[in-house]
Amino acid sequence: MTIESLSHFPDLQSVSSEQFWGLLHLAARLKDERKRLGANAPVCAGKALAMVFTKPSLRTRVSFEMGMHHLGGTALYLSPAEIGLGTRESAPDVARVLGGYCDGIMARVFEHKHILEMMEWGTVPVINGLSDFSHPCQALADIMTIWEHLGDPSKLTLAYVGDGSNNVATSLMQAAGKVGMKMCVVAPAGYQPDAQVLADSGADVYVSADPDAVAGADVLYTDVWTSMGQESERDVRLALFPPYQVNEDLIARTQNPNVRVLHCLPAHRGEEITDAVADGPASLLFPQAHNRLHAQKAILAHLLGGVALE
Ligand code: CP
């Protein structure tokens, strides 16, 4: 069965459950194809992706650049200093110019409205490589990792521990709604999910400030306590979040000897996660990071390479 095609990838609210599963299956196929044959079909041959960054990146930059390379296309890195998105030049103008040179835009922005403006004014697919609202590419790789290592996500519960109001938590809730995965968001008051975002996600989410709420979780997930752009809040957050550190005690509180741990990285080791957990037997941190490549390739193969979702 062919699934309706996507035009852009701004967040997961605009992606149906069928489309999300279609991307997951395509990511798995591309991963398997490269493993078995040593290469992917060049479905993006002759295509170019503009990568607009207003913030630093390791995983997003390299996975998209290598993803285009594996699919036979080219990626162009545009650093924060070069474009000045929203300062030197408006997002609508940037999108209209880049659309004349390139076949797609992947952008990492501070303000989500810049993603929406590029979609509105540009002529090529726009992919959100992280905004203040969401990180949909990360969530696709996260669910791929859970599916690979633990099986059917609809039979699992993920406990997200830390800042439950940030972009990674938001995209995870939206992803959970697509695949029927239960979630528990364990976060202090003031850092819990926005009620509207939670309702729109369609996910079964339990919210608590009590770290003991991780009991029964199959996956523990955390992210930095202070995201990019929130540096002025760092001292306040460092005082508030230590009870939510993912450490061996929190793992024991899940009462699940098979619990696995995810983190989108980069990690502030010793803050939201300890070395013992990040490098321990429960950790899936590096398979998760590596799956960014395969998840991003699925988005590129579909949006730029015209590969149908099935
Ligand atoms: N997780 C993630 O997006 O990593 P980067 O910030 O390094 O791209």
Image (cartoon, helix red, strand yellow):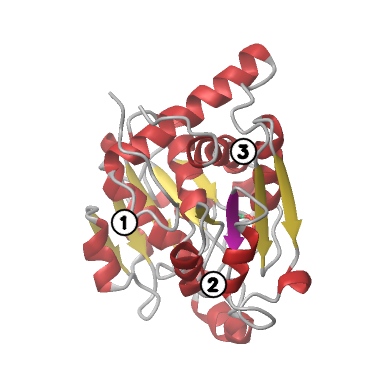
Q: Secondary structure at mark 1?
A: strand
- Whichever of callouts 3 and 2 sits on the residue coming sooner in the sequence is 2
What secondary structure is the magenta-colored segment mainly?
Answer: strand
| Relative side of 131 to 160, left or right | right
Whether residue 41 is visible to the viewer of this picture, yes or no, is yes
Kindly identify which numbered label has been placed on residue 293. 3
- Mark 3 and mark 2: Cα distance apart in space: 28 Å
Horizontal placement of 54 versus 202: left or right?
right
Is 30 inside the magenta-drawn segment?
no
Q: Position of residue 194 (x, y in %)?
A: 31, 73
* Residue designated by label 1: 184
Is residue 182 at all visible to an observer of this figure?
A: no
In front: 29, or 104? 104
Q: Earlier in the sequence, mark 3 or mark 1?
A: 1
Q: Which residue in the structure is indicated by mark 2?
A: 92
The magenta span reads 104-108
